[in-house]
Structure formats: structure tokens, C-alpha cells
Amino acid sequence: MTQLNVLVIDDERPALDELMFLLERDPRVGTIQGCDSATEALRVLQDLAVDAVFLDIQMPGLTGLDLAQVLSRFKEPPPIVFVTAHEEHAVEAFDLHAVDYVLKPVREERLAEAVRRVIASTAPSPSGDTQIPVERGGVTRFISRSDVTHVEAQGDYARLHTTQGSHLVRTPLSTLAEDWADAGFVRIHRSLLVALAHVSELRVDSGRVSVVVGGRELPVSRRHTRELRELLTRETR
């Protein structure tokens, strides 16, 4: 396995040294470059290609979130792992497509998991699958979009249903419907989005149409019935 080249950014020298020390102990990590500010990191990145960036959030001048926004505009943005003492920025971090969010003090086994997620995020995926960060009990986990059977609107949030359970995410259903359309998700109701790959039955009873997804029967509104029939027919050809 090719080792990772990583950039570590923290304005507090002891924290920077500790994080670099722990990463050096991981056999999956190769070269490590340290910076004590986001500004210095940007200068380094002009000449250095990295496989991942581990950075603090609260720093003088440009914050870690500011730097992540800049990196997101790169032609090939590097995976980002936030390493911080402040858990309240997790939602903002994942909105910036962070691979992981590690809380200080950093445990070696937790950092090893972050490295694993970096490697997973860069591995080629023939299915074009996407990992989605979800929170439960104060712990952030990742689920595969291909495991989502349907999505239910809950105000400005959406609940992702899988065969193993459900997860609430801070994204409106309308946004997911648009972003996930190419992945085979279709609107069947103003409050429901289903994965065509998980539709096992289409039922018609006294003019009422429904689908069975992940063992659950879900109603299909009249305005979405024709489109759904056409999509399901196309999928089975």
C-alpha cells in the first residue's frame, strides 16, 4: 500500500507535535509536514501535494473552517480531518465534506480510524457510492448511500432509512432529491424519496399506488405515479 503524505496544522505547538508523533506511529502514513497556521499551510500547499490534511479549527487569522473552504476550491481537494477540542463545529465541518472530526485529547486508536477513513475516501469506487456522515449519541458514523432505502422529510431535516435503522441529517429532502437523482433516488411523495434499487414491489389497490421498499409499504402520490412507473419500467429493461 502506498503511504499517505499528510499536512498537519495546529497553532499550538504541543498539540501539533503530539499529532505528528501519533501519525508517525501509523504505518499507513509516510511523510508528515507540520504548520502552525492556515496561512503557512497555504504557502506549503503551493509546492507540496498531500494526500490528506489534519487541521485544528480555532486558530488566529484564518480558521480551520476558512482553510477548508479554500481547499474545497482546489481542482483536486485533499481529504480533510478536523482535529479540535470544540465539538460544536461538527455540522459545519461535514458541510465542508470533511472525512472525519476528531476531538482532543486525541487517542491513538481514534486517529487510526481517521486514517482509515481518509484511505477509504480516496479508494476508487466502481459503484460511485458515497459515504454519508450521521450522528447518533454524540458519535459521528458513516453510512453508504447505497444502503439507504428511502428518505423521509422532517421539516428542514431528512431521515435516512436503511435496513439497519434510521438517521436524521440536517439536509432538506428537496436538496437530497436534487443531489441524489443521478444515484437512482426518485421523489414519490412531497415527503418521500426512494431508492429505485430497493423497490421490490409496485402495488395498485382501488386506484391507490404504493411501493414496497426495505420491507415497508410507502404511498405514491398521484402526481408522481406516472414518472415512477416509467422509471421502474426502464430499470427492468
Image: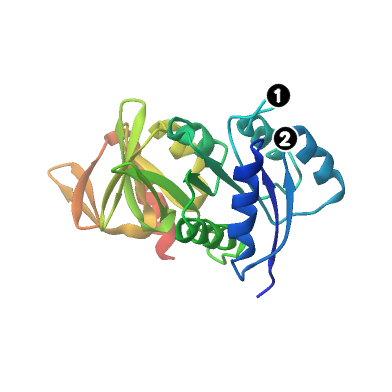
Q: Let me know if residue 79 appears in the view.
A: no
Disc assigned to residue 4: none
Residue 61 numbered mark, or none: 1
Kind of residue at disc 2: Ser
- In the image, 8 versus 114, the foreground residue is 8
Quadrant of residue 39 in the image? top right
Q: Which comes before the other along the chain, label 2 or label 1?
A: 2
Find the residue positioned furthest to the front: 14
Q: Which secondary structure, mark 2? A: loop
Q: Is residue 46 left or right of residue 112?
A: right
Which residue is more in the foreground, 34 or 169? 34
Q: How is the image coloured?
A: rainbow
The numbered disc on residue 37 is 2
Identified at 48% across, 31% down, the residue is: 89
Which of the pair 43/208 is nearer the observer?
A: 43
Can you name the residue that lies furthest to the right here? 47
The percent position of residue 1, horizontal first and vertical second, equals: 65, 75
Looking at this rendering, what residue extends furthest in the bottom direction?
A: 1
In the image, 84: left or right of 230?
right
Residue positioned 28% across, 35% down in the render: 222
Q: Provide the secondary structure element on which disc 1 rests.
A: loop
